[in-house]
Amino acid sequence: MKTVVDKVGSRFEWMSRDEITEFQGAALRTSVARAARSPHYSAKFDELGIDPNDIRLTKDITRLPFTTKEDLRLSYPDKMLTVDREQVVRLHTSSGTTGKPTAIMHTQQDIDCWAELMARCLAMTGATSQDVFQNMSGYGMFTGGLGLHYGAERLGMLVIPAGPGQTARQIMLIRDFGVTCIHSTPSYFMHVAEKMIQDGDDPKPLGIERAFCGAEPYTEELRAKLQDLYGCRVYNSYGLSEMMGPGVAFECTYQDGMHVWEDAYLVEIIDPETLEPVKEGAVGELVMTTLRREAMPIIRYRTRDLTSILGGECRCGRKHARMARFVGRSDDMLIVGGVNVFPSQIEEVIMRNDWLGGNYVIQLAKQGALDKMTVKVEIAQAVFDGSLDNIRTKRDELANQVKDQVGFTVNVEVVEPGSLPASEGKAKRVMDER
Ligand code: ADP
Ligand code: ZN
């Protein structure tokens, strides 16, 4: 694997812990000094009486203010920019899942760095220039398209920029060009498999070896189901537009947490209430500082994504820290009748039942003064015989499993295959009508 990584040309991949720490200290000093040139951070540092020269070591990071999505919105379009407009070669925005999108600008060096990080991610899964890669992510402003695209080209893969949707065409391209690697949201990748099964086809003989799935939370159980349906390995991929996009953290062949590239990002996990660091290994909000970014360095960005840092060393030998599968965003947490629930808890139960398909939604409504939660889930195509009459017992068992998981009674409905809205990008699982 090392030779492939060398092809990507990065000196950062196999750094020791000491080298990482030393590099981070120097990169942080540069990043903070650079950020201070932007109208946003220069005003912020003035206001808080911060002298960028006082930031020497990575531990000094806690003296700096957090940056929130709101800061990015307020500094829209370019108050965080540190270079002349002329040096900017690309603009991306976030998907706007939780409101007005934010805009991030890049210099050529930023784009090159992004491609390098992305290529390192792909190589880490064992992908090489021999692979044929179909990118089912949206191109355009959404970073999943161009982000993966440039990284895969950098690795020398044959890239098919399919974009999302048009499922029949996706399947045709996979077959006709012998696609071995896929990038997709897990929900859309599931949809493609189910579409095939519905048409009496089988996803396994497609010969896909690796799928890079991310952009939305998903459970270990959903991964297992996808791996089983396709007979391939599914690698978790994490990124966000504010930190470039995909390429921030990725699983290696051991599929045991995602390595976050610490030469490019300084990582903290904080308690979102107290804003203090959590105990080692505890779950909290991921906070990231860019270390190699030129056009728009961002300091202590509160991602609102919840994860933890895994202890111990990865068997692959890389020393870059590993993050656990994301629980979700802090704003994904549902409060139902005073009880906290994450959609992923429901997903876990659903995916453990192999008589169910991969698509589900969670509906929340008021019944009088009370919150009412309904889970609608499709039955698996292979099990469906044209009627839902004979699955009542199974459905009741499922309702009990959900109740055991969340601690209160949930209305569970099992519906026909293909009857719930299919996603092409990020799935919308929760409909809150309260
Ligand atoms: P938006 O915040 O508008 O969705 P992005 O398209 O930049 O904008 O999406 C980034 C977000 O997607 C992350 O902050 C995170 O919430 C989610 N995400 C990305 N990858 C993963 C993953 N592997 N697991 C869980 N959530 C993810
Ligand atoms: Zn590893």
Image: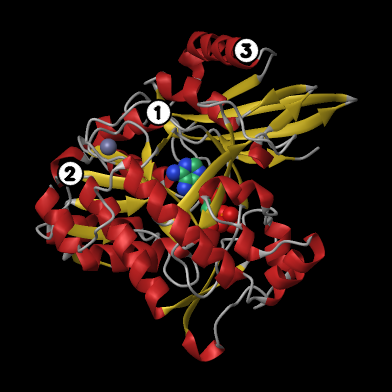
**Residue assigned mark 1:** 220
Which callout, 3 or 2, points at the residue further toward the start of the chain? 2
Above or below: residue 182 compared with residue 416: below
Q: Residues within 10 Å of mark 2 (few under 14, many from 20)?
A: some
- Per the model, the C-alpha gap separating discs 3 and 2 is 37 Å
**Callout 1 secondary element:** helix
Taking the spot 43% from the left edge, 25% from the top edge, the residue there is 351
**Residue assigned mark 3:** 403
**Callout 3 secondary element:** helix
Q: Residues within 10 Å of mark 3 (few under 14, many from 20)?
A: some
The image quadrant of residue 357 is top left
Amino acid type at mark 1: Glu
The answer, for residue 304, to whether it is visible in the render is yes
**Callout 2 secondary element:** loop
- What percent of the width, then of the height, locates residue 84? 55, 88
Which callout, 1 or 2, points at the residue further toward the start of the chain? 2
Task: State whether label 1 is within 8 Å of ligand 1.
Answer: no
Amino acid type at mark 3: Lys
The image quadrant of residue 264 is bottom left
- Kindly indicate whether the residue at mark 2 contacts the one at mark 1 (C-beta within 8 angstroms): no
**Residue assigned mark 2:** 209
- How many circles with numbers are drawn on the protein? 3
- What percent of the width, then of the height, locates residue 73? 71, 66
- What percent of the width, then of the height, locates residue 389? 50, 17
- Indicate which quadrant contains ligand 2: top left
- The residue mark sitting in front, 3 or 1, is 1
- Per the model, the C-alpha gap separating discs 1 and 2 is 18 Å
Using the image as rendered, state which of residue 302 and residue 415 is in the foreground.
302
The answer, for residue 135, to whether it is visible in the render is no
Taking the spot 40% from the left edge, 31% from the top edge, the residue there is 222
Taking the spot 44% from the left edge, 35% from the top edge, the residue there is 417
Amino acid type at mark 2: Glu
